[in-house]
Image (spheres, grey):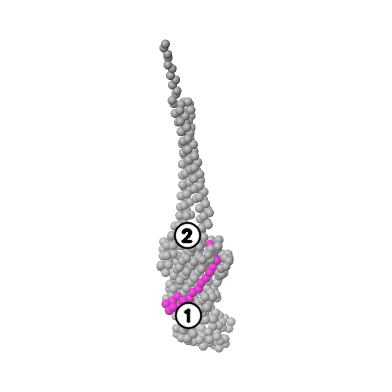
Amino acid sequence: MTQSLHYVIQPASSGCIGTKKSIAEEALVALRRSSKILIILGVGFLILAAVIRFLVVPAMAKLPGSVDVTARYEGTGTLLNAAALQAGDFGNVIASDVPVSVDRHIYVSETAGDNAVAHDDITVSSPGGVSLPSNHTYVLDRRTMDAGGTVSGTEVEQHAGLTIGLPLYPDAAEEFSLYDSATKTTVPLTYVDSGTVSGRDVLNYVAQAQGSLQDPAILAALPPALPKSQLAGLAPLLPADLQAKLGPALAMLPDPVPFNYTAVSKVSLSADQTLGTPIDGALNQQVIANVEVDGQNVSLIPVLALDTKLTEQSVADAASAAASQSRMLFLLSVVTPIVLAALGVVLIAVALMRRRASTPASAQEIRTEESRV
């Protein structure tokens, strides 16, 4: 008896189709997931760029609490020799045209929000061992560099106007004023022109103040009065017209004769166009002794005169520091936001291109495999 054999052949391709379909679906899901991740990263970079540019940079665009700068002025000066005056050595009372230096130490000791406690310590020195310190403490607005608010527990000098520098990105068209610590007055800081100092673009300003000497440190170094005998001994040092005016009035003056002092300050300043910090400058200051005769103030002689300018080393140091800080500011405020924003845009563009290029192909592949089944 013959038996017929029947073989049932199962299509082997059905499992492959399912496998291919599964792989294609998984690939499509993976592509969409990676595209979403890229979009999220791109948006994150854009947000970070905006935060740095519009929040972080403005918050940092103010006087830092780490400021600690020393500058030196050198030139010639006229100084009162108090020891010679007391000894009656009238020939050596006034030392004229002697080399002098002015050391200026500027630093911030404390910050409180937008307020900074800034110190401006000035010391005049001469080869003869004369040292005249004059230290000032201010509260500054860290953005405008003008007078700030109050900082509890800190004794400061009340003032109005700029003291240690201009604000960030100073505008030549803006009107600034300068506080003169000698007279404790505020005067216009007048823009002259722009220029370049040690490779830095600067704005040049001048200011002049004149008035009654109010600086307690300088006043303490000057005699408040002189006995008539000593004043008479000073008479030969005076111009002839003053001798003629003072001589007859000397008998009517009280003994000792009270002095008052007038200060005249002339300042020139070259401020960095980016940071507002001083790059170059000069200081010319006079303190003149006066006596009151018949109700009028009669100027006698300068007891302190300075004609100084910043040393080449100080100018070079200031320019170097400004260049370094400007680079950091440029990197933070311009380069970093641009790089982050560009990276964000690239990531988003790549994500969109991946989705646009892969989704149709993947969908078609799935549809093809499904039709074969």
- Identify the residue position indicated by label 2 in the image: 274
Using residue 368 as the reference point, say whether residue 292 is left or right of it.
right
Residue 195: quarter of image: bottom left
Q: Residue furthest top?
A: 1
Above or below residue 79? Residue 174 is above
Q: Which residue is painted at 51% across and 72% down in the image? A: 135
* In the image, residue 126 lies in the stretch drawn in magenta: yes
> Where residue 72 sits in the image (x, y, percent)?
44, 70
How many residues crowd mark 2 within 10 Å: few (<14), some (14–19), many (20+)? Answer: many
> Where residue 284 sits in the image (x, y, percent)?
47, 72
> Where residue 269 sits in the image (x, y, percent)?
47, 67
* In the image, residue 273 lies in the stretch drawn in magenta: no
Above or below residue 343? Residue 169 is below
- Please name the amino acid that badge 2 sits on: Thr
Q: Which residue is painted at 43% across and 75% down in the image? A: 100
Residue 15: quarter of image: top left
Q: Earlier in the sequence, mark 2 or mark 1?
A: 1
The residue tagged with tag 2: helix, strand or loop? loop
* Magenta residue span: 125-142
Q: Which residue is painted at 53% across and 65% down in the image? A: 110
Mark number displayed over residue 264: none
> Where residue 233 sits in the image (x, y, percent)?
49, 87
- Number of numbered discs present? 2
Q: CA distance from mark 2 to mark 1?
A: 41 Å
Residue 188 in sight from this viewpoint: no
- Identify the residue position indicated by label 1 in the image: 80
Q: Which residue is painted at 52% across and 53% down in the image? A: 54
Marks 2 and 1 close (CB-CB < 8 Å): no
